[in-house]
Image: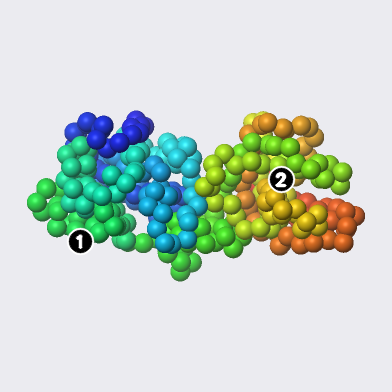
């Protein structure tokens, strides 16, 4: 997969292309259906397959009145996920105030047609684009008659009666429902960051934890609580009990992400870990003291192992 990253005005490649455009935050099952249709259509018509996305996410630039956005995938994660597909070109277009002022017609005519050689566009049912998101699938169909390209609109993907969308995945994660979010994503949600110094309480309680500082400040963190999951460290995968929150037993003000790697013995300070969330265990709560907390952590660990066994994940660690 070839990658272009920068302002659209710097892109000068006019080959005939099948293109899909969007933020693609999460690369969820709906996005994956679009990608597959893009690739199949491009091969059938001998076109170049192009995914055009934006950096940063448009809502981070426009700062509209809606709730501030937190991302499911960073740009680095998006690139890594898209490498799993047979895409010819990934265009990561710089999004700024100037780009946001492009009208729907200008975006299609100047950027997609003029710079990328648009011959076919694949979009989701609710696709919107251009200044103030003023363009939609009807706009594209109208433009296609004048500019000579095909429009392929896909129906929504539904899982268990729920339409798959990035906003729905974010909502599930904010509720702590990481298992349901994984169903919509087609993979387990993950966080990546560096292990930093904590209060060393876990070690004192016989359950040492790795405290994670995220690599990206706008990455969405699931709801406060305790989860079971998997942690990738030093080229290995470990079962883990994961805590997100403020440690109410100790009245901490600092929000933390801590993982107890079951079966690991060693020092991970300064190393980069990836946490994959499998299942919600319980809400965080305040305990009477360290002994009661240690007992509960022991139960969390046992429950984590049981759930990972039920998911048939322990044989992968």
Q: Residue at x 83, y 42 (%)?
A: 203
Q: Position of residue 237 (x, y in %)?
A: 66, 38
Residue 174, image quadrant: bottom right
Quadrant of image for the N terminus: top left
Q: Is residue 312 left or right of residue 171?
A: right
Q: Residue at x 75, y 53 (%)?
A: 252
Tell me if I can see residue 101 in this picture: yes
Q: Are marks 2 and 1 in contact (CB under 8 Å)?
A: no
> Mark 1 — residue?
138
Percent position of residue 127, x then y:
30, 57
Pick the front one: 146 or 55: 55
The residue located at (43%, 62%) in the rendering is 66
- Report how many numbered discs are placed on residues in the image: 2
**Residue 167's spot in the image, x, y percent?**
45, 59
**Can residue 24 be seen in this snapshot?**
no
Q: Is residue 73 left or right of residue 24?
A: right
| Residue annotated with mark 2 | 259
Q: Which SS class for mark 2?
A: strand
Q: Is residue 12 left or right of residue 314?
A: left
Q: Please, what secondary structure does the residue beneath circle 1 have?
A: helix
Of all residues shown, which one is farthest toward the bottom? 161
Q: Residues within 10 Å of mark 2 (few under 14, many from 20)?
A: many
Q: Quadrant of residue 109?
A: top left
**How many other residues sit within 10 Å of disc 1, few (<14), some (14-19) or many (≥20)?**
few
Depth order, front residue of 224/36: 224
Q: Earlier in the sequence, mark 2 or mark 1?
A: 1
């Amino acid at each position: 997969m070839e990658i272009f990253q920068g302002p659209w005005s710097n892109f000068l490649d006019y080959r005939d292309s099948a293109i899909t455009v969007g933020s693609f935050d999460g690369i969820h099952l709906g996005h994956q259906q679009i990608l597959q249709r893009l690739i199949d259509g491009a091969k059938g018509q001998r076109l170049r397959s192009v995914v055009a996305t934006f950096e940063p996410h448009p809502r981070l630039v426009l700062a509209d009145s809606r709730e501030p956005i937190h991302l499911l995938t960073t740009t680095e994660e998006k690139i890594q996920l898209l490498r799993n597909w047979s895409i010819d070109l990934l265009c990561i277009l710089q999004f700024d105030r100037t780009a946001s002022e492009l009208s729907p017609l200008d975006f299609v005519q100047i950027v997609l047609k003029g710079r990328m050689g648009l011959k076919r566009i694949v979009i989701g049912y609710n696709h919107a684009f251009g200044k103030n998101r003023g363009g939609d699938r009807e706009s594209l169909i109208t433009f296609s008659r004048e500019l000579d390209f095909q429009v392929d609109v896909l129906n929504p993907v539904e899982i268990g009666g729920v339409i798959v969308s990035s906003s729905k995945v974010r909502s599930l994660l904010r509720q702590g429902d990481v298992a349901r979010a994984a169903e919509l994503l087609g993979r387990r949600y993950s966080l990546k960051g560096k292990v930093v110094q904590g209060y060393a309480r876990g070690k004192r309680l016989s359950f040492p934890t790795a405290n994670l500082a995220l690599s990206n400040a706008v990455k969405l963190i699931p709801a406060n609580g305790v989860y079971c999951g998997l942690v990738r460290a030093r080229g290995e995968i470990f079962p883990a009990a994961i805590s997100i929150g403020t440690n109410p037993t100790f009245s901490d003000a600092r929000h933390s992400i801590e993982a107890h790697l079951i079966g690991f013995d060693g020092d991970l300070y300064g190393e980069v870990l990836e946490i994959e969330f499998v299942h919600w265990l319980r809400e965080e709560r305040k305990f009477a003291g360290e002994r009661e907390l240690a007992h509960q952590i022991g139960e969390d660990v046992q429950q984590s192992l049981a759930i990972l066994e039920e998911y048939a994940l322990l044989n992968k660690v």
